Amino acid sequence: MTLSREQDKAELRERVWAALDAASAVEDDTAHGRIPAFHGAEAAARRLADLPAWRSAKIVKVVPDTAQEPVRALALEQGKVVYMAVPRLAAEAPFYVLDPARLSVPPAVAANRGKVPTLTNAVDVDELAPVDLVVLGSVAVDPTGARIGKGAGYSDIEAALLTEAGLITERTVIVTTVHRLQVVDAVPTQAHDVRVDLIVTPEEVIACPGPRTAARIRWEDLPEEKIAAIPALAKRRAARS
């Protein structure tokens, strides 16, 4: 069943990537193999910023993908603290904290994921405060809130780490910003997949029915090489032993 579901996900990714390429809807040469940097990402960020959940948020956790760079820039411009994961969670301290009050460069520069490591140090989960809003990238998402990324699972692990630390709760709003072609009828999911409350495209906001299931680290689903490659996971497993 798991293998079949993974195959279904892979086929859906390929269909969405192909549709984006056919419509010339991405900034890169191709959408394939990545979270698409879609045309209209800035408009989606502005639409997100009109929502009450955004306006009331003081701490926003945003993925490091290029498609969500406008979200990071807008958050910093509006005085929000931004948490961004170290790419692939490949460091002992897995999250960057961007505090606009301490930035030495404009928000648009600080939002660039390549610039972030030069502006702030990464910190461990226990140095973070509760998150008000999470913004994810996606390859595909459906109106129920089911979503998939490019298949690496980092967003799910990030959410699980923060949830188990009590920093993401049922009150935390989870959003994805996408191109309209990334919104599909149905997305195959598994237990570890994080669902979203809101889908924001350049043209519309889609509210997804809840409630969400709380994310957790599903050790039984993680291969040894994944645990070894993510120090935060390796440390937590050692603490459980």
Image (tube, helix red, strand yellow):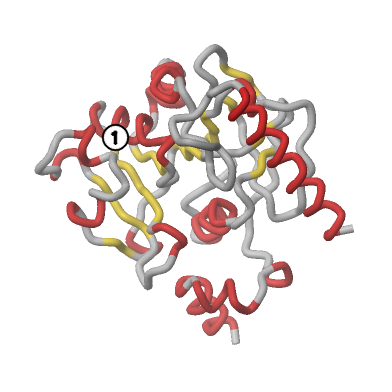
Query: Of 52 and 149, which appears nearest the observer?
Result: 149
Query: Of 60 and 181, which appears nearest the observer?
Result: 181
Q: Residue at x 71, y 30 (%)?
A: 142
Image height of 231 relative to 158, above or below: below
**Residue 48 visible to the viewer:** yes
Tell me: 96 left or right of 241: left
Tell me: 139 left or right of 69: right
Residue 140 x %, y %: 66, 35
Q: Residue at x 35, y 40 (%)?
A: 59
Q: What residue sits right under mark 1 in the picture?
A: 80
Residue 106 x %, y %: 15, 34
Q: Amino acid at mark 1?
A: Lys
Tell me: 125 left or right of 123: right
Residue 123 x %, y %: 31, 63
Quadrant of the frame with the C terminus: bottom right
Per the image, label 1 sits on a secondary structure element best described as loop
Query: Of 121 and 25, which appears nearest the observer?
Result: 25
Q: Residue at x 32, y 47 (%)?
A: 113
**Residue 171 visible to the viewer:** no
Q: Residue at x 66, y 43 (%)?
A: 148
Residue lying at the far top of the rendered structure:
203
Image height of 41 relative to 11, above or below: above
Quadrant of the frame with the N terminus: bottom right
Image height of 47 relative to 31, above or below: above
Question: Which quadrant of the figure has residue 57?
Answer: top left
